[in-house]
């Protein structure tokens, strides 16, 4: 029995898996609001209270992992590999970055778990880039090896935001006044979408319907902005989504170049599936390919979106099993 965990700034997802006949059979699954718990251990105890111990546990965390320990970037949790192993009564515990877990799932997800944004023929030996915007901005990649693909994490989402034109330079100045240093995550994430909305309202003076404004002030601004923008009820929300889509496409194109991602680009996280109608309109792919002499190179890279919001759990389960088998 394998317990897979995806611990993020907004929610923590957990699921039990059993390896059988070369595939993972999923058992019980649950999701908990992360900020209502003081630690990951308390979430694990809640989930396992009526299930007992497990053989293996693998936790993907939204933060850098060093020497079996991680301080989550957008949540005041310290997670330690040995602690989670003991709480779960497991013989082995693994702590990895959540983008490693998401990346590891790519080879195991069925074709129906993806939406294709740009169709192209992938290089079967090429590197695959994985970029996931949600509460934060995660970046990972897959490198081809003898046994398949090997997943790697990065903290590329915290690299500096570089504006492409005057409007983006104004956005940078606006965010710099609010936060100091401006990383890519400050722009392309759920909170980043809200920041873009506020910039358009406060700096560019785009008006908003009072009813929409009340909904945004009522909680979960990124979700409301996405809903109101896609529906067409709020021109300001629609403008924010279009601006966000262009910024997202540009940074994903940059990562495709960084990783030489001829094997393809995969978008994970919660935002891409939620705004597919916007990503499919053209601004995303135009910005993705707008890299001067490398436009044609990027046009030949397939780009797809993971539709399964529990993909990281499948990846974590497979990671635990393969590490167990590799280390005996």
Image (spheres, helix red, strand yellow):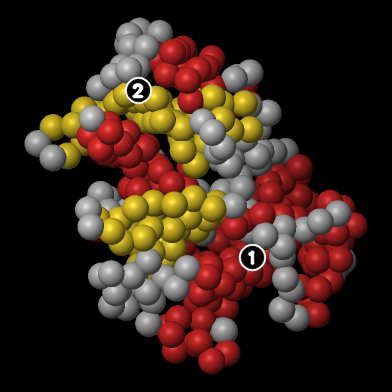
Residue 290 percent location from the top left of the image: 56, 84
Q: Earlier in the sequence, mark 1 or mark 2?
A: 2
Answer few, some or many: residues within 10 Å of disc 1's Cα (few below 14, many 20 plus, some between 14 and 19).
many
Asked if 77 appears above or below 88 in the picture, the reply is: below
Residue at image coords 45%, 13%: 87
Residue 282 percent location from the top left of the image: 51, 78
Drawn side of residue 22 relative to residue 83, left or right = left
- The quadrant of the image that shows the C terminus is top left
Drawn side of residue 93 relative to residue 145, left or right = right
Residue 7 percent location from the top left of the image: 51, 33
Mark on residue 92? 2
Residue 201 percent location from the top left of the image: 82, 62
Judge depth for marks 1 and 2 and give the one in front. Answer: 2
Residue at image coords 42%, 18%: 85
Drawn side of residue 93 relative to residue 231, left or right = left
Q: Relative to the observer, which residue lies in front, 316 or 321?
A: 321
Instruction: Give the residue furthest to the left.
Output: 21
Mark 1 and 2 residues: CB-CB less than 8 Å, in contact? no
Drawn side of residue 189 relative to residue 46, left or right = right
Residue under pointer 1:
244
Answer few, some or many: residues within 10 Å of disc 2's Cα (few below 14, many 20 plus, some between 14 and 19).
many
Q: CA distance from mark 1 to mark 2?
A: 41 Å
> Would you say residue 255 is visible in this rendering?
yes
SS of the residue under disc 1: helix
Residue at image coords 33%, 12%: 53
């Amino acid at each position: 029995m394998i317990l897979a965990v995806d611990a993020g700034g907004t929610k923590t997802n957990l699921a039990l898996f059993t390896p059988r006949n070369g595939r993972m059979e999923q058992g019980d699954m649950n999701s908990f609001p992360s900020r209502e718990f003081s630690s990951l251990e308390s979430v694990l105890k809640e989930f396992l209270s009526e299930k007992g111990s497990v053989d293996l546990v693998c936790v993907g965390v939204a933060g850098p992992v060093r020497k079996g320990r991680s301080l989550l970037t957008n949540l005041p949790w310290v997670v330690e590999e040995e602690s989670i192993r003991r709480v779960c009564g497991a013989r082995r515990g693994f702590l990895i970055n959540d983008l490693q877990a998401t990346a590891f799932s790519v080879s195991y997800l069925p074709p129906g778990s993806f939406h294709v944004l740009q169709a192209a023929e992938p290089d079967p030996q090429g590197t695959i880039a994985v970029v996931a915007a949600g509460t934060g901005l995660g970046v990972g990649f897959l490198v081809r090896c003898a046994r398949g693909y090997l997943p790697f994490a990065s903290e590329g989402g915290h690299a500096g935001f570089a504006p492409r034109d005057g409007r983006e330079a104004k956005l940078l100045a606006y965010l710099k006044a609010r936060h100091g240093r401006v990383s890519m995550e400050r722009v392309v994430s759920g909170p980043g979408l809200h920041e873009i909305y506020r910039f358009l309202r406060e700096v560019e003076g785009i008006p908003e319907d009072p009813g929409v404004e009340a909904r945004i002030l009522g909680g979960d601004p990124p979700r409301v902005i996405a809903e109101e923008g896609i529906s067409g009820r709020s021109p300001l929300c629609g403008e924010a989504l279009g601006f966000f889509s262009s910024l997202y496409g540009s940074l994903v194109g940059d990562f495709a170049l960084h990783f030489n991602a001829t094997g393809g680009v995969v978008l994970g996280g919660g935002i891409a599936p939620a705004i597919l109608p916007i990503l499919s309109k053209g601004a995303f792919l135009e910005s993705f390919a707008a890299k001067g002499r490398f436009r044609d190179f990027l046009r030949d890279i397939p780009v797809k979106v993971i539709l399964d919001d529990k993909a990281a759990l499948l990846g974590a389960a497979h990671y635990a099993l393969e590490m167990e088998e590799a280390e005996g």
